[in-house]
Amino acid sequence: MRRKIVLLHTNDLHSHLDQAPYIHSIIEQQKKEHPDDLVLVIDCGDHMDRMRLETEATDGIVNVALMNAAGYDYAVPGNNEGLTFTMDQLKAAAQKANYRILGANMRRQDDENPDWLHGYDVVEDQGVRIGLLGVTIDFNDFYRLLGWELEEPRGTVKKWFTSLQERRPCDMMIVISHLGIVHDRLLAEEEPGIDVILGAHTHHLLMHGEQVGKTLLAATGKFGDYVGKVTLTYDIDRREIVNREALCIPVIGSGYQPHPVSSHILQHYLHESKGRMKEQVSELKEELDIHWGKESVLGNLLASGLQNWTKADIGLVNSGQILHNLPAGGISREMILEICPSPINPCLMQLRGKDIREALEQSLQLQYQQKPIRGFGFRGEMLGNLSISGMRVYVDTQAPEGERIQQLAVVNDNGQELSWDDDAWYRVGTIDMFSFGIGYMSIQSGTVEQFFVPEFIRDVLVRQLNQASELEKARQRRWWDQTLSG
């Protein structure tokens, strides 16, 4: 006698919620095509992304509502859920979920794990016992600031796998992983008893899966472009899987229509969210500009804000974090989200003068200003030049690349210039993205003193917009081209 188990899976949707009604239709159709088989619907993390209006306004409740409607059975928190929402926000969203949330390597620092979070689950279906275990990437430098402690994930899988098999062996073992393709491959090599790893995090697309030893890896890329389908055929008499198949179903272009239920949910939350996000957070007397290739008021304002927020000597941020100008008049939460959507946190670093100089030199080059950036929290288009605070840069734009900076100076609170030392260490208020070696690479050479969570750089910007003295200071030049008069 043979039994089929079908795993429908998604990953890294990142709140591309317009895909959700199509995903709902695919899931519904697949269940109709497998009326006698066990069908489990699984999300592997990063379904939520706070760059999306509805997700930001509802603290992820809209994502939960769409997953409930589509009939998800399991989900693993990705880093976008775990690191951009507080514990209370996660609890409020999780309590509305009709699916089981698995995170075997997640625990609170007080060891009192929330009742909505589970390590594993076991499903028994017509004599077949299926174990499901969820793990997520262990970014503990950030998780600890939010009250979490994450265990090393691959070791956690080995521990739980051994424990389950000792107590009551499972006929098949499924790992739901938000670790990335490299960790998934290593996990398959280290623990050959795993039958399937459903993957995420690195946005890898495995159209027909990937076999590593006895383990089938599956993943659907990103942004809801595909729904994954893994079909396992289990021979009950022989007590073994006799066939494994994986494929990815295109969400758009396969003839599926948006499901009316999910479409209605999305429209409801869009209307509700727009109402919430109309809240005014500031009032501007004149338009504030942003440029990705030269100094601008909004760039200066954010750099000063990071310096103030982190109590640093210097502020440093790429102008590409801000997407467009802010007009005169009332400024709403929605407008702030539109111009600064990246869920990026302030960061305090110690940087050597020569590493700052190198980044500033690169900032004058078009190849860096127009460099596209993907991931690591960045939701903009290109890197942009460096906006600065607490210093002045004197340049000769006619000089060869790499030799354009003529002089640097630290500027104190009284506006006085202090001498610069390439060998000295400076306390720099910047962004967590730079500490990962993204964008201006020399900045990674520094030492992180503190990450600031759960605040985002848009929270820093709002505070700056409401301080007249900061607005005035942002209009003062920080970059001086010595080839120009004045």
Image (cartoon, rainbow, N blue to C red):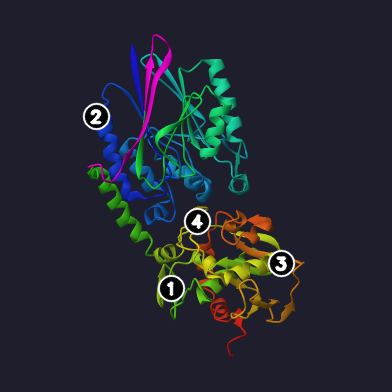
Q: Which mark is residue 325?
A: 1
Q: Residues within 10 Å of mark 3 (few under 14, many from 20)?
A: some
Q: Which of the 4 quarters of the picture holds residue 95?
A: top left
Q: Is residue 233 magenta?
A: yes
For mark 4, give the secondary structure. loop
Q: Nearer the viewer, residue 19 or 51?
A: 19
Q: Residues within 10 Å of mark 2 (few under 14, many from 20)?
A: few
Task: Name the spot of residue 472 as percent of width and height, x first.
Answer: 55, 81
Q: Earlier in the sequence, mark 4 or mark 2?
A: 2
Instruction: Residue type at mark 2: give it.
Output: Lys
Answer with left or right where residue 209 lies relative to residue 164.
Answer: left
Whole-angstrom CA distance, mark 1 to mark 2, is 50 Å
Q: Which mark is residue 32?
A: 2
Task: Name the spot of residue 367 as percent of width and height, x first.
Answer: 52, 66
Between circles 4 and 2, the one closer to the viewer is 2
Whole-angstrom CA distance, mark 4 to mark 1, is 19 Å
Q: Nearer the viewer, residue 369 or 104?
A: 369
- Regarding residue 287, the answer to whether it shows in the image is yes
Task: Name the spot of residue 186 as percent of width and height, x first.
Answer: 57, 32
Tag 4 residue: 343
Whole-angstrom CA distance, mark 4 to mark 2, is 39 Å
Answer with left or right where residue 456 lies relative to residue 250.
Answer: right
Q: Which residues are magenta?
A: 231-255
- Is 52 drawn above or below residue 130 in the view shown? below
Instruction: Residue type at mark 4: give it.
Output: Pro
Instruction: Give the residue displayed 61% in from the left and 63% down from the top.
Output: 430
